[in-house]
Image: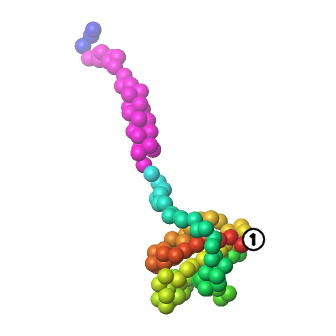
Amino acid sequence: MQFGQRRPTGRLISLTPLIDVVFILLVFFMLASSFLDWRSVDFTVSSGVGAATSAQRAILISLRADGSVAVGSRPVAKHALRSVITAKLAEKREQHIVIRSDPGVPLQRAVNTLDLVRTIGATNVSLSRKR
């Protein structure tokens, strides 16, 4: 070998182990992460006895297919639903509430309304569908 010449290095850095580690970490975080907030909704099924008489005295929340909401027969703005239900429950805390949805209303909208009513403090809530 002559003076001034460099000897070629035959070492190459392999990226295969690095790629393997990255994929293992990716799979680990995909399996370990949960991107949804899973909550359960408690339901009890009633026998249906006395349902007609209690439904007449219940607060009826109607979820319409066009996106509007009504309490009883009175249309209510979505942002005002909380205050209307809170005022009705202030009169009688154990008031029965029926959430009725038209055909075509997404189930998630009914569940969101159920969550809203439950956070207000209602304990006697039923889901119904319009036939």
Residue with the most extreme top position: 1
Look at the numbered disc 1 and give the secondary structure of its residue.
loop
Residue with the most extreme right position: 131
Q: Residue at x 49, y 82 (%)?
A: 94
- The residue lying toward the viewer, choosing from 27 and 90, is 90
Q: Write down the residue under mark 1.
A: 131
Find the magenta span and give its range.
4-33
Q: Residue at x 48, y 75 (%)?
A: 123
Is 4 placed left or right of 81 in the picture? left
Quadrant holding the C terminus = bottom right
> Residue 97: horizontal and vertical position, in percent?
57, 79
- The residue lying toward the viewer, choosing from 26 and 53, is 53
Kind of residue at badge 1: Arg
Q: Is residue 101 visible?
A: yes
11 versus 94 height, above or below: above
Question: In terms of image quadrants, where is residue 30?
Answer: top left
Question: In terms of image quadrants, where is residue 11?
Answer: top left
Quadrant holding the N terminus = top left
Magenta region includes residue 8: yes
> Residue 63: horizontal and vertical position, in percent?
65, 75
> Residue 9: horizontal and vertical position, in percent?
32, 18
Magenta region includes residue 66: no
- The residue lying toward the viewer, choosing from 35 and 23, is 35
Residue with the most extreme left position: 3
Is 102 placed left or right of 23 in the picture? right
> Residue 29: horizontal and vertical position, in percent?
41, 44
131 versus 4 height, above or below: below
Within 10 angstroms of label 1, few (less than 14), some, or many (20 or more) residues? few
Question: In terms of image quadrants, where is residue 69?
Answer: bottom right
112 versus 86 height, above or below: above
Residue with the most extreme front position: 49
- Callout count: 1
